[in-house]
Amino acid sequence: MQTPEDCAQNPWGSEALNITQLSLMRAFRACGVEQVIGISFPGSSSWHNPHRIKQSKKTTLEPGIEIWEPPFLALGPFQPPSQFVACLLNLARGAKPGAFLISNPVSRISVPALIMSRAWHTPITIIASDLSPHTTASNVLRKSQLMLQTTITRHAPGVIVFSNHLGRDLRPTRPWRRMVRPPSKDLLELSPVSPDLNSRIAYYAGTMAEVAGADLFLQATHYIEDSSYRFWFSGRGPLDDAIHIAAEKDPRITHWGFVNREKYCELLQQANVLINPRPSYLLENRYNFPSKLMEYMAAGRPIISTATSDIAEYYADAIILLDDETPERLAQLIQQVCEMPVDKQIALGQRARQHVENETWEAQAQRILDFMQSL
C-alpha cells in the first residue's frame, strides 16, 4: 500500500498551473514523493469554446510530475457536470494514490476526490486558497458556488489555509494547518544593501485597487509636505489613471507600471520603507494572506502594514503595524520610519528577513505531508 511519501494525486482543477501549484509539485518531489499527478481542465472557463469536446491529454512536466486532462463537454451549463463525471471516472480508473491534495474547493473537482478518498480510505486535504466566506455574492450562481465551497471546506477531512482566521472560523473542531507562499529565491539571494539616508522613498508594489489599499497610500502622500520624499507605485489595476494624474500634479509620485523582475528587485532595494496598506476590515483580506508581504520581508527593508489577515499574530515584531488605517496615520508612520537611525532601520529589516529565510516550498510541502499523515 502506498503512503503519502510514495505517491500524491493532485486534482488542481485550474486552467493552468500557477506558481503555487507548480512550486508545490516540485517541492513534493524534493521531499521524497515518488510521483505527483495533477488533474486539470485547461480552458474550462470559456462557455463558448469552439471545440465543444475537450480531448483527453497527458503531459509530463518533469520526471515524476504529470498533468492529466480528462475529456469534458465545453457546452455551457453541461460543462460543470461533465467535468465532475470526467474527474470521478479518471480517479476511479487510476491507480490508488497515497494521498489526495486539492488546490481549491471547487466542487466539480473536490467532490469526486472526496468520494474516491472515502472509497479508498485515502487521506485527502484541501488547500482553501482564495476562499472568502461570508462575502456578498454578485449573483445567484456565484452565491451557490460560494456556499458549496464553504460547505466543502467546513467538512473536508483536512484543510490547509493561508490565514488562521479561515481555519478558526470554518473549522473550530476539525483539523487544519497554516501554510505560506514563500518569497522567490532571487530576493533571498540578493546581497543586503544599507538604506540610503539621503533618500526618503516609500514604495508600494501590487494591484492598483482599493481592495489592495493603493488608494490609501495615494491619499497619504497629501499629508507629507517635505519635498525630499518620493512615493513609488508599481503594478497595474483600476487605479492606474488616478495615480498617473496624481503624478502629473506631484513630481514626488512615480508610477512605474508593471515592471519586470529585475526592476522590481531594484526598486525594493532602493526603497527606505515598503507599504502594505490592505484594508483589514474587508473579508477577502481577513481570509487571504498578502503574499507580497513575504517578498517585502525577504527584501530586508522596514515595512508598514495594516493588520490584515493574521499578520499581527505572526509578524508584529518585524513590521510596523498601521494601527489606524487612515491616510494621516500612514503618512506619520512613513515619516517616522524614514527618520529612524540607520541601525534601527537595518535591524527592523533583518528581523523581517529572518521570518522568511526558512519558509521554502520544501518546508511547506513537508508541512502538508506531515499533516496528511496525521489525519
Image (cartoon, helix red, strand yellow):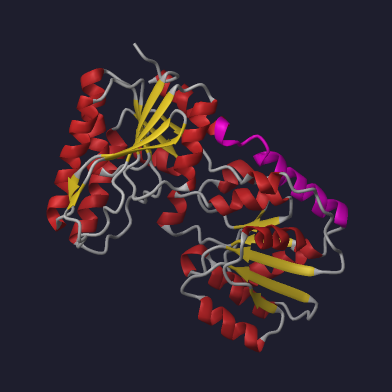
Picture quadrant where residue 244 is located: bottom right
Q: Residue furthest left?
A: 78
Of 340 and 23, the residue lying toward us = 23
Q: Position of residue 49 (x, y in %)?
A: 21, 60
Q: Position of residue 79 (x, y in %)?
A: 17, 51
Magenta run includes residue 49: no
Tell whether 339 sits left or right of 373: right
Range of the magenta residues? Answer: 342-362
* Quadrant position of the N terminus in the picture: top left
Tell whether 227 sits left or right of 4: right
Figure check: 187 above or below 330? above
Tell whether 171 sits left or right of 364: left
Q: Please give the name of the residue rendered at 19% of the width and 63% of the height, measured from the top-left corner.
A: 48
Picture quadrant where residue 124 is located: top left
Q: Please give the name of the residue rendered at 60% of the width and 70% of the height, measured from the top-left corner.
A: 217
Of 321 and 62, the residue lying toward us = 62
Q: Please give the name of the residue rendered at 18% of the width and 32% of the height, measured from the top-left corner.
A: 89
Could you tell me if residue 1 is visible in this image? Answer: yes
Q: Residue furthest top?
A: 1
Magenta run includes residue 352: yes
Could you tell me if residue 164 is visible in this image? Answer: no
Figure check: 17 above or below 159? below
Figure check: 226 above or below 303? below
* Quadrant position of the C terminus in the picture: top left
Looking at the magenta stretch, what is its main secondary structure?
Answer: helix
Tell whether 168 sits left or right of 216: left
Q: Position of residue 302 (x, y in %)?
A: 73, 55
